[in-house]
Amino acid sequence: MTNGINIELVNLTKRFGKNEVLKGINLIIPAGQFVAIVGKSGCGKSTLLRIIANLEQKTDGESLKDGIQQEDFSGVRVMFQEDRLLPWLSVLENVGVGTKLIKNWQPLALKALDQVGLKDRANEWPHVLSGGQKQRVALARALSAKPRLLLLDEPLGALDALTRLEMQNLIEELWLNQKYTSLLVTHDVAEAITLADRIILIEDGNLALDLPVKLPRPRTRSNPKFAELEEILLQHLLGQQNEKSTKPKELQAII
Ligand SMILES: Nc1ncnc2c1ncn2[C@@H]1O[C@H](COP(=O)(O)OP(=O)(O)O)[C@@H](O)[C@H]1O
Ligand SMILES: [Mg+2]
């Protein structure tokens, strides 16, 4: 069961002046799916996410949630690379930002902090926390609103390798429990394979690849299929893939 939002992009186009960043994207993401978006820096990943979040205007086409276009669709939360915590609020109050109009925001915020393993830090100031802990608080803030769609824009990009792995486990565990729709932008191909049901690669403003990932969870890098998938994605990102006609065969070996 899922309470996620389903997303449909129809010929979605975005131009900044003469720069056409998204050139007519067509994509259907069913409710509850975990999708990773990868692509070279500047290819439009954040722009795509921001349009879905209604933080950015599209130029043309449609961005639909549950079949409708609505500016203030509730149940959508975004998490960024920066934690965006407010230094003058306690950890608990930071988690409650955005849900404080709800009468019982404190228990909800405390529960979310518990889910990210930081319940005992509720009354501290953000500056005493480590980078990884601050991102956990940011994640708790996103979760306290019980999102139906969680948009993650390179949320682990600034963390050290070990903390990244811990956070990946946490992100997977929370998604498995709550089954919202999840969209993760990442430049880390292994992270995409670890977490996603499906990986989308954006190239020249178009979808260059739409790969299902059917490896059993939890996924380990020691699985040879993991490595094969990683190789395919890296080759695409580095622009070294062979002729396109070989693609289906390569994929069949993986899936
Ligand atoms: N507000 C903006 N105004 C003008 N150009 C922008 C703006 N935001 C993004 N761009 C341009 O759009 C392209 C895609 O940016 P972005 O979506 O941030 O890429 P990515 O997240 O994949 O690195 C880049 O060329 C960037 O310079
Ligand atoms: Mg970006």
Image: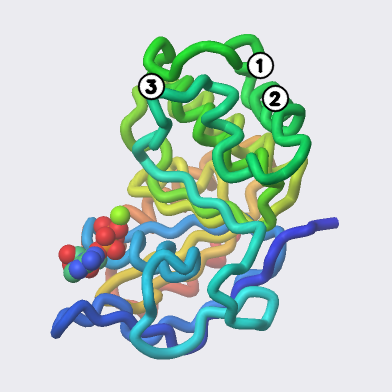
Q: Position of residue 228 (x, y in %)?
A: 45, 50
C-alpha separation, residue under disc 3 versus residue under disc 2: 20 Å
Cβ of mark 1 under 8 Å from ligand 2: the answer is no
Q: Are marks 1 and 3 in contact (CB under 8 Å)?
A: no
Which mark is in front, 3 or 2? 2
Q: Quarter-wise, where is residue 120 in the image?
A: top right
Name the residue: 66% across, 57% down.
75
Inspect the image, locate mark 1, and give the three-letter code of the amino acid beneath it: Lys
Q: Is residue 231 left or right of residue 144?
A: left
Give the residue at mark 1.
Answer: 119
N-terminal-most mark, 3 or 2: 2
Q: Residue at x 22, y 82 (%)?
A: 20
Residue 103 in view in this figure? yes
Question: Mark 2 or mark 1, which is nearer the start of the sequence?
Answer: 2
Which secondary structure lies at badge 1?
Answer: helix
Residue 240 in view (yes/no) = no
Vertical relation: 242 (above or below) 91: below
In percent of the image, x 16 and y 82: which residue is there?
A: 17
Residue placed farthest to the right in the image?
1
The residue nearer to you, when weighing 204 against 251, is 204
Label 3 is placed on what type of residue? Gly
